[in-house]
Image (cartoon, grey):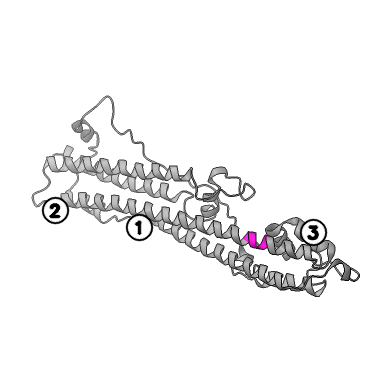
């Protein structure tokens, strides 16, 4: 599987404790929000036109879908390699001639016919994948050692031919590599589902936010104070909804769809997410970043409504 590393992107989740113990009550909070009176049309412009694109989550989902496709391509490649290796006629110990040039290592094109067919099959399947060179950049020997075990590559190099034991090990481990990628692809698919659910929840919050702000703009003679206060309170509920979505995601991060081998990355419990998002341009935790962005937008709308009420508009 590809291993991608990048610095962790910072994000911020709003503090749910928003009220002051020294100044309880709606009136006091609204007064504190009054940084200057604003027009209803300006509020509507800022709140309704500023549609969130949810780019963090959508980009993350696209990246996951692309990675899953690459993983499935690798699965198919290892399955094809196993089939081709199984069809090669191995050389028994009794029928071997003097050892030919060793292939895996210094001279990858040497060796007997059976071993050349194995290496050719590996190049034609696993190493022929479009993304393989750019993501791995390994020689045949390095790739065989990393994917199927250094002892397998060492045995091929030492024998200089394909023994029945080496053949059996190659087929068995290639199929295990394919199975591992199948499991990884399933885990990435579950992450795609989680991202889709999070985007749906965030989009619902944004729809309600725009509806509330648009409600004020729809009043012909300007919003009544009671109506504006009701909108202000409901926006507060939406802000808490954003925090709830972020909290749900934090729980998901603590329970990833798959636990990766510690040799893949040193990210610990977050290794799965480092693997998916570590080398992307977006944040390492896209749902948390998107929740924070939406919470900021809700908070800005709420402050503007508070300014309207406090300014007597």
Tally the numbered discs: 3
Q: What's the CA distance linking mark 3 and mark 2?
A: 76 Å
Does 290 appear above or below 62? above
**Camera-nearest label, 3 or 2:** 3
The answer to which of 34 and 49 lies nearer the viewer is: 49
Q: Is residue 310 left or right of residue 103?
A: left
**Camera-nearest label, 3 or 1:** 3
Q: Are marks 3 and 1 in contact (CB under 8 Å)?
A: no
Note whether residue 56 is visible: no
Where are the magenta residues, as a range?
173-177
Q: For residue 50, what is the image quadrant?
A: bottom left
Mark 3 or mark 1, earlier in chain: 1
Q: For residue 155, what is the image quadrant?
A: bottom right
Residue 53: image tag: 1
Instruction: Quickly name the residue at label 3.
Output: 154
Mark 2 or mark 1, earlier in chain: 1
Q: What's the CA distance linking mark 2 and mark 1?
A: 24 Å
Return the x and y of residue 154 as percentages of the image width and height. Answer: 79, 59
Note whether residue 157 is visible: yes
Crowd band around label 1 with a 10 angstrom C-alpha radius: few (<14), some (14–19), many (20+): few
Type of secondary structure dominating the magenta stretch: helix
Crowd band around label 3 with a 10 angstrom C-alpha radius: few (<14), some (14–19), many (20+): some
Instruction: Quickly name the residue at label 2.
Output: 218
Mark 3 or mark 2, earlier in chain: 3
């Amino acid at each position: 599987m590809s291993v991608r590393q990048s610095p962790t992107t910072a994000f911020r989740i709003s503090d749910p404790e928003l009220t002051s113990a020294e100044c309880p009550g709606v009136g006091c909070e609204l007064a504190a929000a009054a940084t200057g009176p604003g027009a209803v049309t300006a509020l509507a412009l800022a709140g309704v036109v500023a549609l969130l694109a949810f780019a963090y989550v959508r980009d993350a989902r696209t990246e996951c879908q692309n990675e899953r496709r690459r993983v499935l391509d690798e699965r198919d490649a290892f399955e094809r390699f196993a089939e081709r290796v199984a069809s090669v006629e191995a050389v028994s110990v009794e029928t071997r001639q003097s050892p030919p040039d060793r292939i895996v290592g210094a001279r990858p094109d040497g060796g007997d016919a059976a071993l050349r067919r194995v290496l050719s099959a590996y190049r034609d399947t696993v190493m022929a994948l479009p993304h393989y060179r750019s993501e791995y950049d390994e020689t045949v020997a390095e790739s065989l050692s990393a994917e199927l075990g250094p002892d397998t590559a060492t045995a091929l190099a030492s024998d200089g031919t394909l023994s029945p034991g080496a053949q059996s090990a190659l087929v068995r481990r290639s199929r295990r590599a394919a199975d591992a990628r199948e499991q990884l692809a399933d885990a990435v698919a579950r992450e795609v589902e989680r991202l889709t659910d999070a985007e749906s929840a965030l989009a619902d919050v944004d729809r309600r936010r725009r509806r509330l702000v648009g409600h004020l703009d729809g009043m012909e003679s300007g919003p009544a104070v009671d109506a504006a206060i009701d909108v202000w309170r409901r926006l507060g509920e939406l802000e808490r909804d954003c925090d709830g979505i972020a909290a749900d995601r934090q729980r998901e991060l603590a329970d990833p769809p798959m636990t990766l081998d510690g040799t893949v990355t040193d990210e610990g419990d977050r290794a799965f997410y480092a693997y998916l998002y570590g080398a992307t341009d977006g944040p390492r935790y896209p749902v948390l970043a998107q929740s924070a962005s939406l919470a900021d937008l809700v908070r800005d709308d709420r402050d503007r409504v508070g300014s309207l009420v406090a300014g007597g508009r």
